[in-house]
Image (spheres, rainbow, N blue to C red):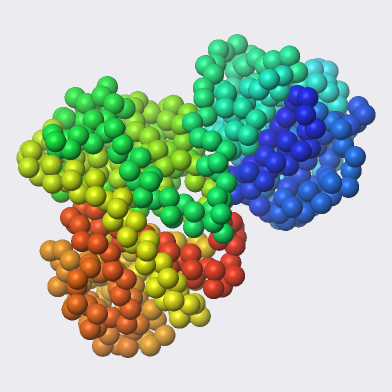
Amino acid sequence: MCGIVGYIGKRKASEVLLNGLNRMEYRGYDSAGISVIEDSKLITMKKKGKVSLLESIVDHKSLTSTIGIAHTRWATHGYPNDVNAHPHSDNSGNISIIHNGIIENYYALKIKLTEEGYTFKSETDTEVLAVFIGALYEQVNDLERAVRMALSEVSGTFGIVVLSSHEPDKLIAARRGSPLVVGIGKSEYIAASDATAIVQYTNSVVYLSDNEMAIITRDGFTTKTISNRKTIKAIQEIKFSIDQIEKSGFEHFMLKEIYEQPHTIRDSFRGRLLSEKGNVKLGGLSSVKDKLRSAGRIIITACGTSWHAALVGEYLIEQIAQVPVEVEYASEFRYRNPILNPDDVVFVISQSGETADTLAAVQEAKRKGATVLGIVNVVGSSIARETDAGIYIHAGPEIGVASTKAFTAQISVLMLIALYLGRMKNLSLADGRKIAAELNELPAKVESVLQNAEGIKSIAKEYSTAKNFLYLGRGNNFPVALEGALKLKEISYIHAEGYPAAEMKHGPIALIDENMPVVFIATKDDIYDKVISNIEEVKARKGKIIAIATEGDSRIGRIADHVIYIPDSISFLTPILASIPLQLLAYYMALELECNVDQPRNLAKSVTVE
């Protein structure tokens, strides 16, 4: 969630830190703050609201410091206001801390510290940790040791960076369950929760593991476990460029990412699709090929949009490979003591590779002895490192909070997995070649869908005053209905629900009247006539019908109020083609309502806390 960044080097720290906050504002935008050491004193400035408000304060200061920390917040404990904003200090005002995560035993620690005479200004769990570190520093007079002692006693999750005027040439960074990466430049180091804050300065990084610390000075850094055992870290390369995290002329990151999908979909199967063989080469799964071949059941677990992709994957794998699939919310999977069999394979899906519930599901499945495979976007992320094997989706950085290109890339990779498993099983060469040919044509078909943007924009304008929407689909288009409704809720704040179309008669039909827009995914497939019957039922009750239909379908135009056409394709790929008009519809609805598309209220890009 929150964006954290620390800097030590030769540059003006405030400029590097504020630039990092702007890069990471999609991780949290309730408030922002900065601490630097200026003339041997700790100076902290923080402000409720966007990073731009903090910048206006910092710009009025003549700061020359070359060390500091900064934070952009997504609130967990305490209202978004100036006092609760990070960084937080100890009672002496000499130690400052930024934190991503939740300290679960903060209340017990706060009571203990209060009884010892320490005081608190905020409602946050982070200030308790800061005061606790300060209290321990009074005893041991060593920042590294004080931080280690404190972290040994806290429960919960954290990614932290600590700064102290007592030791003005040192940063202490540590993580447990919350991402942290250290960028290695020329005589400078940047610790951050996201590589987007680093890539402008260096592409060489190390990723901290759980329960690991980095002690960073002007001369270098060392890594240790929190229990004080030295560790050795491999230096890795950031795989994206600064250009990929710019808007590149688009009004919003979300729109840019929607229009990147022809490229990101192709990148997801580039070098993997063997068209002539009707098969797939997945090097990331080669070590578990035999396990996949003998799998009696596949479980896919994820959260949010990734869960919707998992539902599409269930249809794909069961239909193409004839392997039973179950899809689980990661937040439920981790707590319900799931039953796993020796021949089960668990896939986990996460764009960031840091989703707290999904990461916990990985750990639960591994604890039970399952083979756990990851489908993630961010190279070097926690899930990528903790799973037994996996596949990167290669969608590139996704900055918009509402996921678009990662969703379609996830489905593309799930299609590859289904084809891979199908060819291991009973899928014929001819059928494999047909699927491969359709995949090769998919980017061009997505491009043609994007050319309908103006028509979708006019539909959004007409229905921007609606208070509720229904999204309905059947078969592998049911998850598309769920995803379409989620996108509308996320960025326009309009209430929307997705249902299997046949389930409408079992309750939701009571909502339908002349003021209720209903979006149908009604593409030509084996159950097309069933969907048409559902549309007629809505029409009979004066509902407004927006249909996603296959090009050349003249029948649907006679009953729907609006039709958005997508190219004909095999049914396995219609979820990708059908989801893109719904992304655009949500985007243009949000524009009509003057919502903040890239930073919708109450949301953050990567959910790294429970």
Question: Is there any visible trace of residue 233 in the rendered image?
Answer: yes
Residue at horizontal 51 percent and vertical 80 percent from the top: 465
**Of 476 and 122, which appears nearest the observer?**
476
Residue at horizontal 39 percent and vertical 73 percent from the top: 455
Question: Is there any visible trace of residue 488 in the rendered image?
Answer: no
Horizontal and vertical percent position of residue 221: 67, 16
Residue at horizontal 43 percent and vertical 38 percent from the top: 377
**Rendered image quadrant of residue 91:** top right
**Of 116 and 270, which appears nearest the observer?**
270
Residue at horizontal 56 percent and vertical 51 percent from the top: 247
Horizontal and vertical percent position of residue 562: 33, 78
Q: In which quadrant will I find the N terminus?
A: top right
Q: How many marks?
A: 0
Horizontal and vertical percent position of residue 390: 34, 31
Horizontal and vertical percent position of residue 534: 22, 76
**Rendered image quadrant of residue 286:** top left
**Of 101 and 524, which appears nearest the observer?**
524
**Rendered image quadrant of residue 277:** top left
Residue 57 left/right relative to 461: right
Residue 248 left/right relative to 15: left
